[in-house]
Amino acid sequence: MSAALLSTLRGNAEPVVCALLRSDGAGQPCPACQAAQTRAHSPLFRAHCHGCKVRALAQGPQFWRSLKEGAHTDAYQGELAAVFGAAGAREGHAVVLAEYRRLRALQDNAVRCGLVPRTPEAANDDGRNDRTDTHNTNQTDNNPCEG
């Protein structure tokens, strides 16, 4: 899958990460990308899926170091080049950043709905430490916390 396809916009929507999830995409959707659409911490990744590689970068330590330092580290730049090619690293970072923001919004929704604790200490205090963020699969349009 090319970086150009990944950065294609659907109207006012965010860039497409997994082309197989597009409504006009061919073939079956990647099950790992499909699971990650509703679950911020989906543990599923497929080795040859470009969308999975983008999600792995967005959750990876090199991306986090770059955010913390305010500049791309050499290691993160190398990871971008490995996934998007040397010429596509800058555009690739925009795709990774959009995926990071999407995953963070899913996690924020789970916290807001009380299905995952805000902090590890809160999990011990209120007894909700056995809940996970799998609630997103049956949300209603009116109230994202019902479902």
Image (cartoon, grey):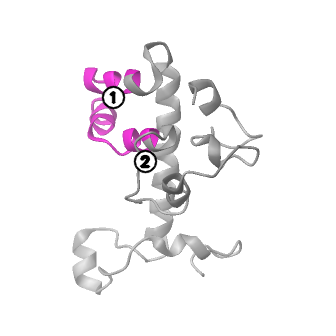
Q: Is residue 101 visible?
A: yes
Question: Identity of the amino acid at label 2?
Answer: Arg
Q: Percent position (x, y) of residue 38?
A: 54, 63
State yes or no: residue 78 in magenta: yes
The residue depicted at 48 percent of the width and 55 percent of the height is: 32
Q: Secondary structure at mark 1?
A: loop
Dot 1: few (<14), some (14–19), or many (≥20) neighbours within 10 Å? few
Question: Identity of the amino acid at label 1?
Answer: Gly
26 vs 89: above or below? below
For disc 1, the marked residue is 70
64 vs 30: above or below? above
For disc 2, the marked residue is 46
Q: Quadrant of residue 73?
A: top left
Q: Quadrant of residue 114?
A: bottom left
- Magenta segment, which residues? 53-81
Dot 2: few (<14), some (14–19), or many (≥20) neighbours within 10 Å? few
Please state if 33 lies on the left or on the right of 124 as rendered. right
What whole-number distance in Å separates the C-alpha atoms at marks 1 and 2?
Answer: 30 Å
108 vs 80: above or below? below
Q: Secondary structure at mark 2?
A: loop
The residue depicted at 74 percent of the width and 41 percent of the height is: 12
Q: Is residue 71 visible?
A: no
Q: Percent position (x, y) of residue 125?
A: 24, 83
Q: Quadrant of residue 7?
A: top right
